[in-house]
Amino acid sequence: MANIHSTALVDPAAKLDASVTVGPYSIIGPHVTIGAGTTVGSHCTIDGHTTIGQNNHIHSYNSLGAAPQDKKYAGEPTRLVIGDGNTIREFCTFNAGTVNGGGITQVGHDNLFMAYVHLAHDCFVGSHTIFANNSQLAGHVHVGDWVILGGFTVVRQFLRLGAHSFTAMCTLLFADLPPYVTCQGQPAVARTVNAEGLRRRGYSPTRIAAVRSMHKALYRENLSLEAAKERIAQIAIDKPEALADVQMMLDFLAQVSPKVGIVRSRRRLAD
């Protein structure tokens, strides 16, 4: 049997691995599944059609899987899916998806969510990310792997944050943030590349130089987006070791909506 505190209310239909721990006064609904080694702190509410993987550490006072904050939601059995090895600190709110958004809010593996983080409906968060205190995602936001959000970052709905990108404290995002780019401000302004993060993840000097060249094409040469993409494609020819990095950037830029665009530098790019 799972280690469930006597004051916790766990619906008999919930599926909890025998190694799961549930703290005092927590409430777990009938459509919840929790994998091996996961711990749930006190005063948590885990509701809706929520699946939580293995070895997650969910601290006290969290709300996971509640109905989306969307007036169109009509009680459909939409889902929240959380992977393995995540740490969710106090007072976080992760909402289930909506039918119009695909029906699922999804979180990958090995993420750190500090206190008061909000994931709205239909968000996708990759793996190995860090969300500092009070980071807030509106609906339908896609966050790539290894992204770091500074405290009090706010992201508008339907945006994308590319892998290895970084936001400074109190950043307000109104446009897509390309991979590797660091930004800061209200609204966000592109600053430089996340070189220190890449070094910590084992990127070679050649790959980091290629990332810097991509940033230069996007933000320092006053090129149009189409011209910048052509320049970036050339980088893979000059530095074959960075082919995967260049391709990831090009794939991201290919999906940029003209209505949304990408985060700009203070010196605006050409139209």
Image (cartoon, rainbow, N blue to C red):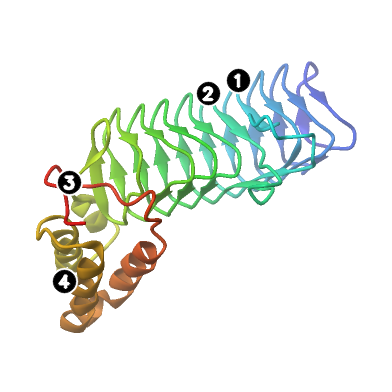
Q: Which quarter of the figure is the N terminus placed in?
A: top right
Q: Relative to 128, is 84 on the left or the right?
A: right
Looking at the rendered structure, the secondary structure element under dot 3 is loop
Residue identified by numbered label 1: 61
**Which mark is first along the chain, 1 or 3?**
1
Q: Gap in Å between the C-alphas at discs 4 and 2? A: 40 Å
Looking at the rendered structure, the secondary structure element under dot 2 is loop
Taking depth in this image into account, of 206 and 7 the one nearest to the observer is 206
Q: Which one is in front in this view, the residue at disc 3 or the one at disc 2?
A: 3
Residue identified by numbered label 2: 90
Query: Do residues under tags 4 and 1 come within 8 Å of each other at their CB atoms?
Result: no
Mark 3 surroundings: few (<14), some (14-19) or many (≥20) residues within 10 A: some
Query: Do residues under tags 1 and 2 come within 8 Å of each other at their CB atoms?
Result: yes
Task: Give the farthest residue toward the right.
Answer: 12
Image location (x, y in percent) of residue 214? 19, 64
Taking depth in this image into account, of 188 and 222 the one nearest to the observer is 222
Residue ID at (79%, 34%): 75
Image location (x, y in percent) of residue 43? 66, 18
**Which mark is first along the chain, 2 or 3?**
2
Image location (x, y in percent) of residue 234? 19, 79
Residue identified by numbered label 4: 206
Query: Do residues under tags 4 and 2 come within 8 Å of each other at their CB atoms?
Result: no
**Which mark is first along the chain, 2 or 4?**
2
Residue ID at (34%, 29%): 151
Image location (x, y in percent) of residue 222? 11, 58
| Amino acid found under the numbered disc labelled 4 | Thr
Residue identified by numbered label 3: 265
Q: Gap in Å between the C-alphas at discs 3 and 1? A: 39 Å
